[in-house]
Image (cartoon, helix red, strand yellow):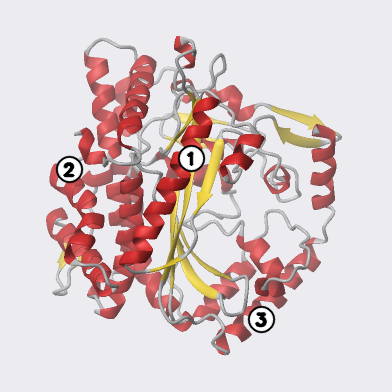
Amino acid sequence: MTADLAERVKDVLDVDAEAFEAQARADAEVVKEGLRDGVFDNHQAIVGLEYEFYAVADGRWRADDEVHALTRVPRRLLELIGFEKELGLHNAEMTTSPQPLSAYGLRAQESEVKARLAAALDCARSEGMRLVSDALWTIPPAGETARGYLTDAVEVDGVRLATNMSDAVRYHAMANGPNAPESMGVDAPHVSFEAPTVMPESLITSIQPHYQVAHAADLPTYFGYALRVAGPLLALGVNAPFFPPDLYDAGTSAEEVLADGWDEGRITVFESVLNAEDSEKVRFPRDVDTVEEAVDRVAGDPSVVPMAVSGGDRYDDRFATLRRKHGTYWRWVRPVFDGPTRSDANARIEFRPIGAQPTVRDSVAFQAAFAGLMESLPRRAHPVEGLDWETARENFYAAARDGIDADLTWVTNAGDTTTNAAELYDDLLDHAADGLESAGCSEAEAAYYVDPLRRRVETATTPAAWKRSEVRTRLDDGDAFADAVTGMQRSYIGRQKETLLEGCFTDWL
C-alpha cells in the first residue's frame, strides 16, 4: 500500500505545471463566459455546511490513559457512516445537501446533521470510539506523543509519506513537489516545531457554512460584507486556546500559555503550516470589485501541487482544472464556482473562520447567523460595508487572539463607528435575525438560531473562555499543566456527550 501510494504521488509530480496553469487560465475564461450568460444565477439563496470531526477512544473497556485519547478511524467505518476522509486518519467530515435559505431549509440542514451524526455515533460506539465536535484536539493517541503522531513519516523511493495521514494523494504530494517548503511545522505562541509534511494541519477541525448568492454579479458585495462580519463572528466562536501539552516549547509555564495563547489557535496552525515565505496561501483576503476578479484570483493563485484532472459529465467538468486549483485556494473567506449541471451552477461564499462548536445547535447557529447577515446587510445597504479593509483584517486577528474580549471596530446601522462590544453585537445579531425573518423564518424561529450567540455575548463566555476557566480551576487545585489540559478536554467531551444533538453550549454554564 505504501509503495503504491508513493507511485501515485510520483505520477502527480510528473504533471506539467505550465500546462496546468495554462488550462486553469482557460477554465477561468469558461467560468467568466458563464457568468456573462447568467449561468451562475439562481432564483434564491442556498445554504450548505461542511462539518469536520475527530475521533477519540471511548468505551467501558478502555484503559484510563485511553479515555478520550485521539484514535484512528477505520476506513471501512467512514464508508459505513457516509462521512468523507480528511487529512488525518482520525478525521471525518460531513457535507450537508444544499437547501434553500428558508425556515424549512434551515430545519432540513439541522435535521440532516443530527440524523447522520446520530447514526455515525452509534456505529462508532461499536468500535469503541466517539466523534467529537471541537476545534483542536489536545490528547494524543494512547502511548504516543502529539509531536510524534504529527511528524512521523517514511520515505519511499524519494517520496515522503506521513504515517498518520489519509491516502489522499494530494495531501502527500504537498510535501514532495518542487514548490514544497522546507518545513511545514507550527509557529504559535510558545509552540514551535518542524514537520516534514502538512500533517500538523490535522490538529484542527472546523465548520464551513456556504451561502449561495442569487445573482452572481452581486458576489463582490456579499464578499465584502462577509469579510467585515468575520472578526465579530470569530470572536463569538473561538474554541481552540490550548495545544496538546507536549507540543509546548520546553520551559514554558502554564501562566505564559494562559497569558499569550490565542483563543483560536486554529488560525495560527492553518497559516503557519501551509504558508511559505514567498506565498501566503492562507490569509484574510482582500475585497473584490467584480465577480470576474474573484475568478481570476483563483486562476492566478500559486499552485501547490498541479494535478491532472479527468473529464466527466458534470457541467463544472468544463472547468475542472480551475476547480482542482481552487482546492488549495486557502482563504478564510473564499468564492466558489461550480455545479453538477448547468441549472445547478452557482456562485457562493465559503465562510471558513469558525472552528467546530460544542454542539450541533451552536454550529448551526453560526451557519444561520452568517446566512441571515448575508441576507440583511446587502439588502439594507448597511454602512459597515464602508469599514476599511485594514480594520476588518485587524478585527479578524484580534478576535483570533482575544476572542470575545477583543477590541473590535464596527459601523452601526446608524452610521456610527463604535468599539463598544454591546453596540456591535446588538447591531450584528439584530441584522442576522432580520435576514432570517426576511428569508421566511418567524420571529421565534429566527431567535432559535440567533439566541445561542446572544447568550455568549450576555455571559461573556465562549467555548475558549470555558476551556480556560476549566484549566485555571485545575491549576488552582494543584494539577500540573498537562493534567489540567487533559482534564479539561475530558470534561469537554463528557459535557458534549450529554448535549451534542439536543443541547446548547450555554447549557454548560
Q: Is residue 141 above or below residue 411?
A: above
Name the quadrant containing residue 181. top right
Neighbourhood count class around disc 1 (C-alpha, 10 Å): few under 14, some 14–19, many 20 upward: few
Residue 321 in the image: x percent, y percent?
71, 67
Tag 3: amino acid = Glu
* 393 in relation to 52, above or below: below
Query: Can residue 452 be seen?
Result: yes
- 3D distance between C-alphas at marks 3 and 2: 48 Å
Q: Position of residue 445 (x, y in %)?
A: 22, 61
Q: Which residue is mark 3?
A: 29
> How many neighbours does mark 3 have within 10 angstroms: few (below 14), some (14-19), or many (20 or more)?
some
Residue at the (39%, 50%) spot, across then down: 354
The residue at the point 34 percent across, 65 percent down is: 104
Side of 317 where 11 appears, left or right: right
Instruction: Give me the disc on residue 119.
Output: 1
Give whichever of discs 3 and 2 has the lower sequence position.
Answer: 3
Left or right, 504 with reference to 339: left
Residue 227 percent coordinates (x, y): 37, 64
In the rendered structure, find residue 460 and report the number of the disc placed on it.
Answer: 2
SS at mark 1 in the image: helix
